Image (tube, rainbow, N blue to C red):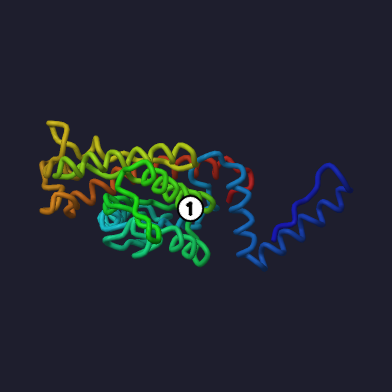
Amino acid sequence: MIIQTATTRGSVAASLLSALLAAILCTVLGGPCLAAKTEELARASTGHIAPFPKGQRYRLYVLGDSLAANLADGLVWALRDVGEVQVVKRTRAATGLVRDDVLDWTRSVAELLNDQNVDIAVVALGGNDRQDIRIGVRRLTRFSAPWRAEYRRRVDRLMRTLDRHAAVYWVGLPPVRSRQMTGDYQRLNAFYRDLARAHDIKFIDTFDRFRGASGGYAAYGGGTDGAMERLRDGDGIHFTVEGSRMLGRLVAEEIRRDLRAARAARSASPDDN
């Protein structure tokens, strides 16, 4: 722990003694001092990502379905030069917020947060949620009023769970080959965007980046070097390696901006070293 010296009460001698004890404890205990310093910097920051003491790494978890797996691979590439960030892939295909009998994402995330330090969470979910919701014997028809209310509750519950512990980025669903699916994905994105505003969560829209000249789905687009590349997989939903990198770059741009703000806040701290 850190013993903070008082400057408004007590004698100068007492203050000097407290400072000496603090230095000794920091030297001996190390870890607790680092944690206290992290909390101090976080309280002083108004940015999306809390500033960490110099030399400490952020643990960035990518959470979600198979599209999140594409994103995780892309983020590893897009943040490869950022030594202060460790990307951890925590994804499972064919899951979402509708079929919580397959995987309850909120419960899984709560267990993760209880077991691991998650500093940054990047979420990509919803690709498998175009189906009815079953609650016991009840069946809520997709996009009906009861379905919308329940789905909104589930999104809100997951966002609340994450937002208490991490800087959260929710990545919207991209356009896909099927026009009907694309329309449904836009409806789901509206839930995510709206609820993100209610929490301290950044919503990252992917539609503009991956739409074609006609305004809809495009399998090809500008790649990492600017040349025309195939960005989408043969199923018309997922991303190729190049597409995953472009998706990762899109999300990384927002994270990099917030990391710069966190570094600036850390540098402004008089106790930074």
Given the current orientation, which residue lies at the most extreme top position? 214
Q: Is residue 208 left or right of residue 258?
A: left
**Location of mark 1 (residue):** 162
Given the current orientation, which residue lies at the most extreme front position? 137
Q: Is residue 121 left or right of residue 244?
A: right
Give x and y (percent) for residue 104: 40, 61
Which sits in the foreground, 214 or 80? 214
| Element carrying mark 1 | helix
Q: Is residue 126 left or right of residue 4?
A: left
Residue that appears at 53% across and 64% down? 114
Which sits in the foreground, 32 or 124? 124
Which sits in the foreground, 43 or 158? 158
Residue that appears at 34% across and 50% down? 140
On screen, residue 131 above or below 270: below
Give x and y (percent) for residue 272: 59, 48
Q: Quadrant of the N terminus?
A: bottom right
Type of residue at label 1? Leu
